Amino acid sequence: MPGHFHLNTPLVESVGMSKRLGTTVYLKMESAQPSGSFKIRGIGHLCQQVGPWQLVNTNQLIIMCSGGNAGMAAAHVARKMGLPATIVVPSSSPRLVVQNLQDQGATVKITGKVWDDANAEALRLLETEGLTYVPPFDHPLLWEGHSTVITEIAASMGQKQKPGAVVVSVGGGGLLCGVAQGLRSVGWEDVPIVAMETVGADCFNAAVKAGTIVTLDDITSEAKCLGAKTVCRKAFQYSQSTELSIISELVEDQQALRAVETFLDEERVLVELACGAALAAVYSGVIRRLQDEGRLPSPLGPLVMIVCGGSSINMEQLANLQHKLHRPT
């Protein structure tokens, strides 16, 4: 079994984004991970830390609920460890996600409309069938694994340089927690985090505005991989901390889609709509506006974009999104 399951992904400059923003923009290409997204960092780390040899010896099933990317990471890790995996997904998951999970050797169970429904079923199976539950975003070992994305960025940038800001997409808050933890571990507590969501999958922004954790009535965004109704408590606590600066911003689905399309044209990489929420921070002018408002410095040091990736996208799925969001193919 490998020392870890994730790759040290490239940190590359985006000429197009840099030209738009007037400062250097670096892309941390988590789309290059074996499972297609950053999720393998935390899930791989958790599976290695919770007694993998005991799991192998007892041949327990790994079970988790997922909108796609966490499930892909769990299925990949389980296959590498020689364990069967059951992944519970909501009915909103694209067919592509189900097929990809099955290709990894996982058993897929479709339950409910959104992630929260699938999570309830996964927890029921945990109790009734004695399976090993792998949470998709709300666990300290996940955040610890995700924090390696920042330690890698720090190693790539060197001691004489640090980001002016880091941009992330937020769903349940696992990546945000990992980035926050990573910034603290490398002494970059003063680096702002721009936390991006789409309208209709905005549980973190709703909590920040309310000053308390809230549960959304429904997920109405097409960015289903951002589709947790409630953000994890640790992410909300970070938003209230005076030691870190976290700026919560929203974009419309159409803006995230345009970001996906532009990124494909300029960087020749196809990512899912959830990742497009982060990319839209540059492409839709969010970073510029934050500078104009004095919430980010101007001039701004190098901007680091976490390209979280995504396994639930291909050209057919892109065309479906374009149709739904009234964009011509």
Image (cartoon, rainbow, N blue to C red):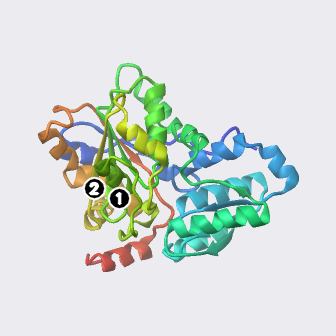
Q: Residue 250 carries which label?
A: 2
The image quarter containing residue 291 is top left
Give amino acid for label 1: Asp
Classify 111 as above or below 65.
below
Q: Quadrant of the N terminus?
A: top right
- Asked whether residue 270 is in view, the answer is no
Q: What residue type is labelled 2?
A: Leu
Q: Say which element carries label 2.
A: strand
Residue 272 position in % (x across, y down) = 41, 62
Identity of the residue furthest to the left in this view: 292
User: Are there few (<14), some (14-19), or many (20+) residues within 10 Å of tag 1?
Assistant: many
Return the residue at label 1. Answer: 202
Secondary element under disc 1, as helix, strand or loop, is loop
Looking at the rendered image, the quarter that the C terminus falls into is bottom left
197 vs 184: above or below: below
Query: Relative to residue 161, is residue 102 depicted above or below?
Result: below
Q: Where is residue 290 in the image (x, y as percent from the top left)?
A: 18, 43
Residues at circles 2 and 1 in contact by the CB criterion of under 8 Å? yes
